[in-house]
Amino acid sequence: MANIFAIVLCAFIGGGGRYLLGAVLPVTAGFPWATVLVNLLGSGLLAWLSHAETVTVKWPSAVTVGVGIGGLGAFTTFSTFSLDLERLLIQQAWGIAGLYVGITLIGGLLLSWLGVWSARRWWAFPVVEEL
């Protein structure tokens, strides 16, 4: 039950954060900056959390699933990425669509690698027991 509560609470925070970021970063020149930013941040943060949790610090499962599934799951959005891409393709904005896909996919992978690298650097000590 603690895991479900943590997921719901963190999803509330993550979804609210995504909404606020979307309100602050409007679509400029047809490019969905807010969606790119949340997906890139989420890729790096989830990789960092997953690597730090599995390799070094053993957080309680409510923290891991709450932040990972709830918070970052609600913060990031593949469905909005797909909808934005569909709109760009319907508008025949081929260059912007290609840039959007490239930045999202390649940038997400690079930030995931950065997340793992930074977790290794940050938690450069042996595994500790569950907090």
Image (spheres, rainbow, N blue to C red):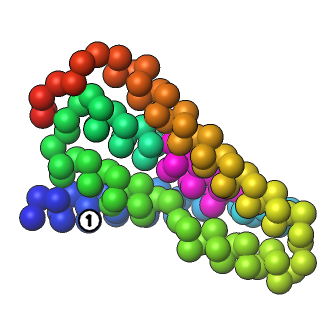
* Near-viewer residue (130 or 73): 130
Q: Residue furthest top?
A: 125
Horizontal arrangement in the rendering, residue 116 relative to residue 94 (left or right): left
The quadrant in which residue 113 appears is top right
Residue that appears at 19% across and 35% down: 58
Magenta residues (range): 33-44
Badge 1 is on which residue?
8
Query: Magenta stretch containing residue 43, yes or no?
Result: yes
Task: Tell me: residue 49, above or below residue 91.
Answer: above
Horizontal arrangement in the rendering, residue 91 relative to residue 118 (left or right): right
Where residue 114 sits in the image (x, y, percent)? Answer: 55, 33
User: Please, what is the three-letter code of the amino acid marked with disc 1?
Assistant: Val
* The N terminus, quarter of image: bottom left
Residue that appears at 89% across and 72% down: 93
By secondary structure, the bulk of the magenta-drawn segment is best described as helix
Q: Residues within 10 Å of mark 1 (few under 14, many from 20)?
A: some
Q: Which secondary structure, mark 1? A: helix
Residue that appears at 56% across and 68% down: 78
